[in-house]
Amino acid sequence: MSLMLAITTRYHQTVRTVLILAYIAGIIGMQLPALAHYFRPLSPVTLACSLVVLLVYHTDWRPAFYLYLILTLAIGYFIEVIGVHTGSIFGHYAYGWGLGAKVWAVPPVIGINWLILSYCCGSVCNQLSLPTWLKILAAATLMVVLDLFIEPVAVQLNFWTWFDKPVPLQNYISWWLISVVLFTLWYALPFDKENRLAKWLLILQFIFFIGQFLFIFF
């Protein structure tokens, strides 16, 4: 893992710049009619690449971290499978094709999305001078704040569609409760939570969805 640390130290500025340019290009490209056809299918690729870069910055690869990865991917994906098929978790919704191919009516990349967001929010909130239980609540709340911007944009980009209009309060409550479970797992498992790319990736997620929101609704 020392090689990973050396790579991130040497090329951190370049990696950060490339990510910023990629996300800004995504904001513009997905809203310009001449470019949207090319940019919109890249959403799952962008998520996968973001996860790879985030993990390159991770330095503590003990078994506990592998457990976190596996459980978060599994929980994030299968909770969506149950949610889509029953409507009892988030409300009544269905995935479109904006996030790529679907298995059991859910794109597998949605598990990656849960992993990226929980990792970034958990890492950022880990820096707060608070008891662990307050960090868990803060990280879960941060996830929901981001989802407030994600939901209206996701519908417009054909990520998913809500049959309940507007987006039900149940969705946000469930997001918060599931996030509490994920962050309890995150803080309970013994591995280093620091990742200096996490805050930048989280900021870019906010910029991307707020930027799309402004383009679409204003």
Image (cartoon, grey):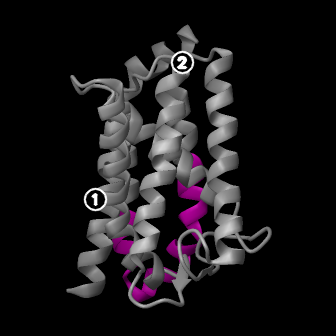
Q: Amino acid at mark 2?
A: Met
The residue sitting at the right extreme is 104
Cα distance in 3D space between marks 2 and 1: 27 Å
- At label 1, the amino acid type is Ile
> Magenta segment range?
24-49
Left or right: residue 110 compared with residue 181: right
Taking the spot 58% from the left edge, 68% from the top edge, the residue there is: 89
Is the stretch drawn in magenta largely helix, strand or loop?
helix
Q: Earlier in the sequence, mark 2 or mark 1?
A: 2
Determine the secondary structure under disc 2.
helix
Which quadrant would residue 210 be assigned to in this image?
bottom left
Nearer to me, 112 or 2: 112
Q: Residue at x 64, y 35 (%)?
A: 69
Q: Quadrant of residue 139?
A: top left
Percent coordinates x, y for residue 3 in the rendering: 56, 12
Report the residue marked by disc 1.
207
Q: Looking at this view, is 36 or 76 the one in front? A: 76
For residue 101, the mark is none
Q: Position of residue 66 (x, y in %)?
A: 67, 26
Q: Residue at x 36, y 58 (%)?
A: 144
> Which residue position is annotated with label 2?
4
Taking 211 as reference, is 190 above or below it? above
Residue 45 on the magenta span? yes
Confirm whether the magenta stretch covers residue 110: no
Residue 99: give x, y in percent of width and height.
Answer: 61, 69
- Assess disc 2: are there few (<14), some (14-19) or many (≥20) residues with their C-alpha within 10 Å of its C-alpha: few
Q: Tell me which residue sits at (35%, 31%) in the image.
A: 133
